Amino acid sequence: MKTMTRDWFHHFLEAVQMTKILFHEDAYLKERQTKVTKIEGNRVLLEETMFFPQTSNEPGDLGKINDCEVIGLKKEGDEIWHILNKAPLFKKGDTVNLQLD
């Protein structure tokens, strides 16, 4: 029974994934390492991000995740998707390097 409960809990956590927003804690953060939680083509979801998504009044941040350029960001609910210039070579669960321009 414990295994079933643990599996259910991990599935639940994946379903309610939310990106921890680091720019609220430290607006001057320029580099960080974090884990990849999901990849869809050239869109990447991370455990946490220091990238600020575009709003109607402000342009979003640009930078890099490993060797990929971040060309845009999209906030969907509690998630911030990082849109890259190409499909990444890293995989879900990998630790990646974030760098703001």
Image (cartoon, helix red, strand yellow):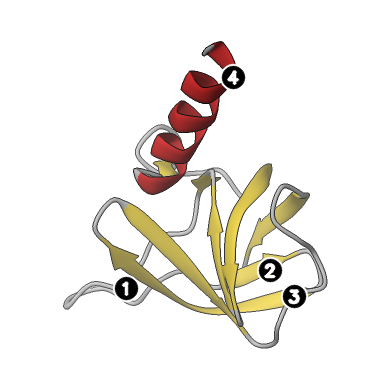
Alpha carbon of mark 2 to alpha carbon of mark 4: how far? 38 Å
- Mark 1 burial class by Cα count in 10 Å: few <14, some 14-19, many 20+: some
Check disc 2 and report the residue beneath it. Answer: 64
Residue 54 marker: 1
Q: Secondary structure at mark 1?
A: loop
73 up-or-down from 48: above or below: below
Give the residue drawn at x 75%, y 53%.
Answer: 97
The residue mark sitting in front, 4 or 3, is 4
Q: Are marks 1 and 2 in contact (CB under 8 Å)?
A: no
The residue mark sitting in front, 3 or 2, is 3
Regarding residue 32, the answer to whether it shows in the image is no
Closer to the chain start, of discs 1 and 4, is 4
Pick the residue in front: 28 or 92.
92
Alpha carbon of mark 3 to alpha carbon of mark 1: how far? 22 Å
The residue mark sitting in front, 2 or 4, is 4
Provide residue 83's location: percent of width, then percent of height: 53, 78
78 up-or-down from 40: above or below: above
| Amino acid type, mark 2 | Lys
Closer to the chain start, of discs 3 and 1, is 1
Which quadrant, please, contains the C terminus? Answer: bottom right
Q: Is residue 46 left or right of residue 25?
A: right
Check disc 4 and report the residue beneath it. Answer: 3
Check disc 3 and report the residue beneath it. Answer: 88
